[in-house]
Amino acid sequence: MATISKKFIIVVAVLTMGFRYHVNAQDSTENSEGRENTFTDPRDGSVYKTVNIGTQVWFAENFAYLPEVDTVHISVYGYKGNSVKKAKGTESYKKYGALYSWEKANQLAPEGWRLPTDADWMLLETAVGMPKELAVKNGWRGDENSTVALKDKGHSGFDIKFAGWRTDYGDFRFQNEHANFWVADARDNERAYERLIGLNNKKIGREYGNKGCGFSVRYVRDIPVEHHITYPEKEWEMMDDVSEFGWSQDKINQLYRYAIDSTNATGIIVIQSGKMIYDYGDTHELSYIASVRKSLLSMLYGKYVENGTIKLNKTLKELNIDDIGKLSEIEKEATILDILQSKSGVYHPASNPGGNEWLFPERGSKKPGTYFIYNNWDFNVAGYILEQETGKDIYEAFEKDIANKTGFQQWDLSKQRKSGDTSKSKFKAYHFELSTRDMARIGYLMLRKGKWKNEQVIPASWVERMTTITTSYEEMYKVDPRLKDWPWWKWGQGLMWRIWDSPDIAPEFKGAYTATGNQGQYITVFPSMDIVVALKTKAVYGRRTNKEAYERFLNKLIDARK
């Protein structure tokens, strides 16, 4: 094998695809281990076989979506034209699918699927028998049994076939000899991880490829095989064997020392698919969770938006909302949706500090809906609007609609209270006190797209809307000049949730989102790993776990699965 560079031997995989174009085929609901199911890509009606391997669900065929074709980003082996119809007519396409640059492989994943990370591949490899101590090595590793298991007609059902690859300067090579697949993890600006498998090679290569090359793609699903998903009862249950999900127990144990030495956290809990894999500090203790309250309020809105009780296009004027010193007519044009996005254009003082008041433009200078500022006035008014439109107290609604339905362990209605200086604004802040364990239930409800056991507690469409970016990471930089000096700032904004949006994040953070609170309160949901992290720092001690220390904790956690 040549050294991996612009010219290196790579590998590609594939499956027979002649049956793929049955548009009426439906996603299978079968979930037994090793059973082949199907997924229909709604964009073109292509039907792909999928397979359950260990805790994961994988494409069992090569991806073949072909919105365009060239010899740069999306190509078909041996075809150098630009006709999608002609490319689809080739035997190579019908048998082996398409080849994609690393950028396109990341961009084109169907909804609910994603390009697998290096850790995903290791989990697959160890599930079919590769020892973990070999899986973490670079180069050619593994043994004949684990390699054969993944090849055509191997017992895993992954069914690799040898599709060849395209160089980054447009040549096609090694069809029926090699297979290689893109991995989501970038090595540097030019290269990314890949997996290489040869027809006659008894090992699997873990190497780096130039991002412009054309490789095959197998996507993995955002959630694991359903029979691995559980819900807690009265208590979170500790997972018996974390290695089942690819974790290193030794590395997880090392997180306790990091938590002690490098954070001021008073409680941390990590949930994998419904069970605890990490529990630090007093996770039962009730204490203040600061601005995490805003994410909780956003969740409460879902039910009432869906049933029409709250209409997001209603304006402050229609709601008869005013404040001390009066709002202007242009400010009263702000809608409920503008307020949930923190884009009201109302730069009135809030009853409590904590927004970015020092960045406020002149009042009336920004049209509602056009300009994001982290604005406590907006967040407080959002609480008032929910109570006005539903006729319910925030805390009582939260207890009935969320806490009771998800079995909160330490919820205490009497501990929840509003505060604020009503000489500045009549809209108070709605503070919450929760335990770390109940923060984890909040995250797990979001991870399960608003469903708890057999009940849809929050509309799934609302979970999607809350966690869709309304102000991007790049737009944030235009608003707040401090961010250029904060390398740890990685977020855009959804509806009161922080969305991980920086180009400088590990692939596991794709689709992740976080609720944050001052002094170190965090709930982070990782759909790509099916995990929730809840971390709390008790405010009365006067200490904080800053965002930089928290991100380091998350990265160390992710590393425990590699």
Image (spheres, rainbow, N blue to C red):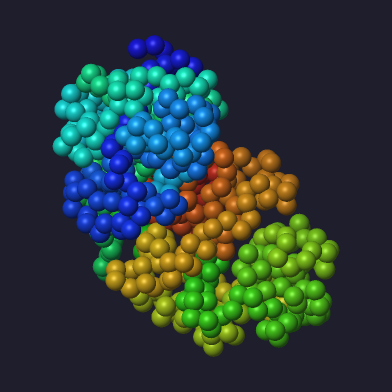
* The residue positioned farthest toward the top in the image shown: 2
Q: Position of residue 296 (x, y in %)?
A: 50, 68
Q: Position of residue 281 (x, y in %)?
A: 37, 54
> Would residue 23 appear left or right of 328 to someone viewing this image?
left
Q: In which quarter of the image is residue 324?
A: bottom right
Residue 500 shows in this picture: yes
The correct choice, above or below, for 41 with respect to 173 in the image is below
Q: Which of 464 and 246 is in front in this view?
A: 464
Residue 561 shows in this picture: no
Residue in the image at 53% along x and 71% along y: 297
Q: Where is residue 347 in the image (x, y as percent from the top left)?
A: 76, 67
The number of discs equals: 0
* The residue positioned farthest toward the bottom in the image shown: 391
Q: Quadrant of residue 322?
A: bottom right
Q: Position of residue 217 (x, y in %)?
A: 39, 36
Quadrant position of the N terminus in the picture: top left
Q: In which quarter of the image is residue 77?
A: top left
The correct choice, above or below, for 68 with respect to 327 in the image is above
The correct choice, above or below, for 530 with respect to 66 in the image is below
Residue in the image at 39% along x and 11% along y: 2
Quadrant position of the C terminus in the picture: top left
Residue in the image at 22% along x and 27% along y: 147
Q: Nearer the viewer, residue 515 or 150?
A: 150
Residue in the image at 78% along x and 66% along y: 367
